[in-house]
Image (cartoon, rainbow, N blue to C red):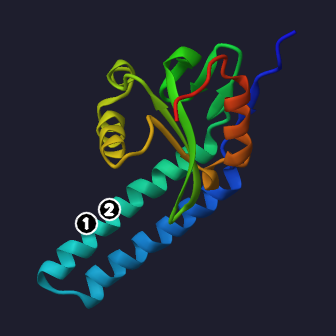
Amino acid sequence: MTEAPIVVRGSRAKLRRAAALLSFMALLGLVDAIFLSQGAARIGFVLAAIVLAALAALGARSASRTDPVLVIGADGVEHRTVGLIPWSDIADVAVAHGPSGPRLEVHVYDETEYLHRLSTLVRLLVRLSLRMGHGLISISEGALDTRVVYLHAQIEARAPHALAR
């Protein structure tokens, strides 16, 4: 008998709070640009406000999605953006700790096989993340409804082969 898949969803409340905070920061940047700054600083605040507003929009969009972020099943790990990664393609799974808290990192043997599945913008962001040593999938616990330590243990327990260390 196979185990039931583990379905992981995004934490809608956490994503909404992050989107609200980013929106507020974008608004402060615009207020600073309009009323307080001059010259190059004004341009910098406007650009920062645009980036923060875009991130807020992405966070709000993610908070409105109901499909799973991650599914750990019999065939492998399926990510909402990357798709299914079979167990045989997973080289390592780790819990990394950074400024935004713990995150689940899934490393594969050949990233290029999966990069073509991504949109141009996401592909650029994932390539940058890979260059910084992150996995093909790198998910912050703050964006999930499940603790990453639990997910890590479940992936290791379900992997039909010993993951590389």
Dot 1 amino acid type: Leu
Q: Position of residue 24 (x, y in %)?
A: 49, 72
Q: Position of residue 50 (x, y in %)?
A: 32, 62
State which quadrant residue 72 falls in.
top right
Q: Which sits in the foreground, 124 or 61?
A: 124
Residue 34 visible within the image: yes
Mark 2: give few (<14), some (14-19) or many (20+) Cα within 10 Å: some
Mark 2, secondary structure of its residue: helix
Q: Which sits in the foreground, 15 or 107?
A: 107
Q: Which mark is residue 47?
A: 1
Q: Which mark is residue 35?
A: none
Relative to 161, residue 7 above or below: below
Relative to 96, residue 39 above or below: below
Q: Which sits in the foreground, 136 or 79?
A: 136
Q: Position of residue 108 (x, y in %)?
A: 45, 27
Q: Horizontal placement of 10 versus 50: left or right?
A: right
Q: Which sits in the foreground, 112 or 94?
A: 94
Residue ID at (63%, 56%)? 142
Dot 2 amino acid type: Ile
Q: Are marks 2 and 1 in contact (CB under 8 Å)?
A: yes
Relative to 160, residue 141 above or below: below
Q: Horizontal placement of 72 versus 33: left or right?
A: right
Q: Position of residue 4 (x, y in %)?
A: 82, 20
Quadrant holding the N terminus: top right
> In the orientation shown, which residue stands out farthest toward the right?
1
Residue ID at (57%, 42%)? 94
Residue 145 visible within the image: no
Q: Horizontal placement of 10 versus 44: left or right?
A: right
Q: Which mark is residue 50?
A: 2
Mark 1, secondary structure of its residue: helix
Relative to 135, residue 76 above or below: above
Q: CA distance from mark 2 to mark 1?
A: 5 Å
